[in-house]
Image (spheres, rainbow, N blue to C red):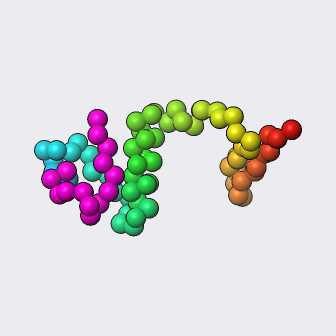
């Protein structure tokens, strides 16, 4: 498997139906390449990243109005 992230600097033959199975774009801004990669990784990992726990110093929890930051320092 090969994932190519880019636009103008990627040779046009990579965008053909014979070469690529998928061509994903999210808008036409530079950050769209990162968004397309994030969508691919989410599908590829079957969203398992959401269940992964990290041993960081803080935990950020989403909420309906912003976020909650929990410090794990003792």
Residue 71, relative to residue 44: is it above or below?
below
Q: Between 33 and 48, which is closer to the camera in this rendering? A: 33
Apparent side of residue 51 relative to residue 13 in the rendered image (left or right): right
Q: Residue furthest right?
A: 74
Inspect the magenta stretch and tell me whether residue 10 lies in it: yes
Q: Tag count in the figure?
A: 0
Inspect the magenta stretch and tell me whether residue 7 lies in it: yes
Q: Majority secondary structure of the magenta segment?
A: loop
Apparent side of residue 47 relative to residue 43 in the rendered image (left or right): right
Q: Could you tell me which residue is drawn at 19 percent across and 56 percent down?
A: 11
Residue 72, relative to residue 8: is it above or below?
above
Q: Where residue 57 sits: x, y (%)?
A: 74, 42
Q: Quadrant of the N terminus?
A: top left
Q: Where residue 41 sits: x, y (%)?
A: 43, 41
Q: Residue furthest bottom?
A: 29
Q: Between 9 and 47, which is closer to the camera in this rendering? A: 9
Apparent side of residue 25 relative to residue 56 in the rendered image (left or right): left
Q: Which residues are magenta?
A: 1-14
Q: Where residue 31 sits: x, y (%)?
A: 44, 62
Q: Where residue 47 sits: x, y (%)?
A: 50, 36
**Quarter of the figure with residue 19:** top left
Q: Quadrant of the C terminus?
A: top right
Q: Could you tell me which residue is drawn at 35 percent across and 66 percent down?
A: 28
């Amino acid at each position: 498997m090969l994932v190519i992230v880019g636009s103008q600097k990627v040779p046009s033959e990579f965008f053909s139906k014979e070469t690529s199975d998928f061509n994903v774009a999210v808008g036409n801004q530079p950050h769209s390449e990162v968004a397309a990669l994030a969508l691919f990784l989410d599908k590829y990992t079957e969203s398992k990243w959401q269940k992964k726990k990290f041993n960081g110093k803080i935990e950020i929890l989403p909420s309906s109005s912003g976020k909650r930051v929990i410090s794990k320092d003792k």
